[in-house]
């Protein structure tokens, strides 16, 4: 009997394998097609519609003109690795060796995938929070490990008891995403300590996805897992420049952690892209020395978040105001009942034609039929990383739902 090809296991893990064996497009592609066909305002896919600071782009141009167009070192150009180490020390008090404990990657996705491939395999279990970003599930399936999602509570917080119950002697890794996509939850110090306690008890590695580390609002604070007692020696920290500097297409990411774990990840990563972004890496090295640009972006996004949240409430959605990221989770239960729709996915399919707006169902970030998928079945994720005029247009359209 022929085993199921790994690519089909990946498709199944990310909800792309239908009952008849056909491969579906991702929810992002599906909703983008709808947006293009209907002329809808696309508040589904989370990418900025304005580029990052001009001076960072000029730095990349200067690097190109200076001839930095061939392969960069596999672990990243020295100035980027040193800038990452300096950033972690300056912002969080972490002491990181740029020569042995830092690895530049092609975005955070490669760092996360390489870490999961390097450190887990068949028979291992990898815990994530649920909802989860789809690439996390895909990488676990690529490794042949078992994905163990732990659902957030209905108010989108960590369920510490569920986490403790999920951890077993087979748990090889706990993957923590904070600030959390898709919910915008920022885990508190106390919540992270509960994760850390489980990791220490089970003697397991923690992999953290911190790409939204600078995009936190109000009194929320991003706390890196590696800053907690006893965690630096078992934590691989992943972040990237894409969200922080609104340069998502450059795909300059990184990882840092204990040298032996970074060596393991580098061993796998070098057979993926090997290296990329030779001219972008020195530009991001300069950008990481600037604390003002991320602060300005976060302040601007906080205003746009408030604009979108207020508009969604006027449009009849119940809103959980996010503490971080680009995203708002809104409950459309009232609209489902009024329109005779089954769930948030159905609502998202109808919104482009009903009012000309695209969102993404939160259930797309859950396992089909899971407790989290059922609990969040009426929730929709909207992004506010768009120009204010685009958001105003979107919320004005959404208010037509109440007319």
Image (cartoon, helix red, strand yellow):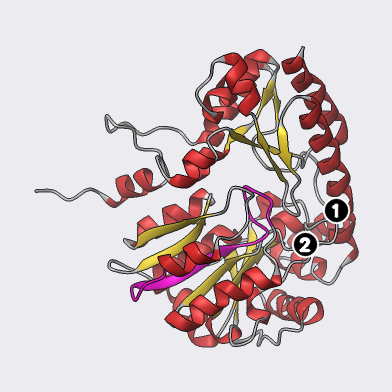
**Residue marked by disc 2:** 214
Q: Does the magenta stretch include residue 169?
A: yes
Distance, label 2 to label 1, CA atoms, is: 9 Å
User: Residue lying furthest left in this view?
Assistant: 1
Relative image position of residue 254 (x, y in whole percent): 62, 69
From this view, report whether residue 27 is shown above or below residue 299: above
**Residue at horizontal 56 percent and vertical 72 percent from the top:** 195
Crowding near the residue tagged with mark 2, few <14, some 14–19, many ≥20 C-alpha atoms within 10 Å: many
Q: What stretch is highlighted in magenta?
A: 167-185
Q: Residue at x 70, y 58 (%)?
A: 212
Q: Residue furthest top?
A: 403
| Residue 207 visible to an observer of this rendering | yes
Q: Mark 1 points at which residue?
A: 297
Q: Earlier in the sequence, mark 2 or mark 1?
A: 2
| Disc 1 crowd, CA 10 A, few/some/many (<14, 14-19, 20+) | some
Type of secondary structure dominating the magenta stretch: loop
User: Are the residues flagged by discs 2 and 1 in contact, CB closer than 8 Å?
Assistant: yes
Percent position (x, y) of residue 273?
Answer: 49, 62
Q: Is residue 53 visible?
A: no
Q: Relative to residue 46, is residue 335 depicted above or below?
A: above
From the viewer's perspective, is residue 133 above or below residue 312? below
Residue 4, percent from left and from top:
22, 48
- Going by the image, does 69 lie left or right of 390? left
Residue 92 drawn above or below residue 344? below
């Amino acid at each position: 009997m022929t085993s199921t090809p790994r690519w089909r296991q990946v498709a199944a893990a990310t909800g792309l394998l239908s009952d008849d064996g056909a491969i579906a497009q991702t929810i992002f592609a599906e909703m983008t097609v709808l947006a293009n066909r209907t002329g809808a305002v696309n508040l589904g896919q989370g990418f900025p519609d304005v580029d990052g600071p001009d001076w960072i782009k000029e730095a990349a141009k200067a690097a190109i003109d200076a001839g930095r167009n061939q392969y960069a070192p596999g672990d990243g150009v020295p100035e980027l690795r040193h800038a990452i180490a300096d950033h972690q020390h300056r912002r969080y008090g972490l002491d990181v060796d740029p020569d042995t404990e830092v690895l530049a990657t092609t975005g955070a996705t490669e760092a996360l995938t390489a870490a999961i491939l390097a450190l887990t395999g068949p028979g291992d279990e990898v815990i994530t929070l649920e909802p989860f970003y789809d690439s996390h599930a895909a990488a676990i399936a690529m490794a042949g490990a078992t994905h163990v999602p732990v659902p957030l509570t209905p108010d989108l917080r960590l369920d510490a008891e569920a986490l403790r119950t999920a951890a077993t002697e087979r748990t090889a890794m706990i993957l923590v995403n904070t600030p959390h996509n898709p919910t915008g939850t920022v885990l508190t110090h106390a919540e992270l300590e509960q994760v850390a306690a489980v990791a220490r008890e089970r003697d397991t590695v923690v992999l953290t996805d911190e790409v939204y580390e600078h995009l936190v609002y109000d009194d929320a604070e991003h706390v890196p897992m590696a800053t907690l007692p006893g965690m630096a020696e078992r934590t691989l920290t992943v972040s990237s420049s894409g969200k922080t500097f609104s340069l998502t297409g450059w795909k300059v990411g990184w990882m840092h952690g204990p040298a032996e774990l970074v060596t393991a990840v580098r061993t796998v990563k070098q057979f993926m892209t090997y290296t990329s972004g030779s001219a972008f890496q020195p530009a991001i090295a300069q950008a990481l020395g600037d604390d003002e640009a991320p602060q300005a972006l976060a302040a601007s996004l906080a205003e746009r978040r408030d604009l979108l949240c207020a508009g969604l409430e006027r449009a009849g959605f119940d809103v959980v105001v996010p503490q971080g990221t680009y995203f708002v989770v809104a409950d459309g239960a009232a609209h489902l009942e009024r329109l005779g729709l089954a769930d948030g996915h159905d609502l998202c399919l109808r919104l482009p034609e009903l009012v000309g707006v695209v969102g993404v169902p939160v259930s797309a970030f859950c396992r089909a039929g899971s407790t989290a998928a059922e609990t969040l079945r009426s929730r929709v994720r909207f992004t506010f990383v768009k120009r204010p005029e685009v958001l105003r247009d979107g919320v004005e359209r959404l208010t037509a739902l109440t007319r």
